[in-house]
Amino acid sequence: MAHNEFVYVGESDAEVKADMEDKVMWYIRTAAKIWGERDRSKVATQYANYNDVLEWLEVVSFEEVYESLGMFGTPDTVAEKVRWMRDEGGVDQLMNFMWFGGLEQDKVVRNMTLFAEEVIPRFKSQK
């Protein structure tokens, strides 16, 4: 199964939070405003719960986003989340959303580099 996930890797949780809190929260709040139809009478039955998700995105805290809505943290933390998604979630194709909310290019490149050099190698021998 393929899955798209926010990813931000840094040297410490404090660094990651400082780098991306405003950026990811801006993205989430903006997405909550523009995604979907708000008039529930116009929403197909099979998508009825989608508005609940949009309403949640309007009020979710950064701590909840950090813990449960992406793979954020040190290489060890992110690698454990990747492992969990693979082993428990059945994800075998991960699409990383690594540039969001106007993150500065140097931070995006560092994020990608840390993921490529510190996280991916842990899974090369595992299939």
Image (tube, grey):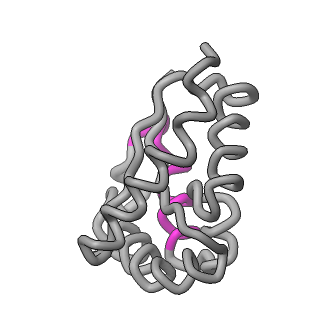
Image position, residue 66 (x, y; %): 63, 69
Image position, residue 68 (x, y; %): 67, 59
Q: Which segment is the magenta one?
A: 44-57
Q: Quadrant of residue 24?
A: bottom left
Please name whichever residue, 120 or 103, is drawn nearer the observer in this view of the structure. Answer: 120
Please name the residue shown 63% across and 40% down the image: 82
Please name the residue shown 44% across and 42% down the image: 4
Q: Quadrant of residue 38?
A: bottom left
Please name the residue shown 72% across and 45% down the image: 80
Image position, residue 117 (x, y; %): 48, 46
Left or right, 56 with respect to 42, comes to: right
Left or right, 63 with respect to 28, comes to: right
Q: Main secondary structure of the magenta part?
A: helix
17 in magenta: no
47 in magenta: yes
Looking at the image, is 76 positioned above or below residue 33? above
Looking at the image, is 1 positioned above or below residue 80? above
Q: Which residue of the protein is positioned furthest toward the top in this rendering?
A: 127
Left or right, 40 with respect to 62, comes to: left
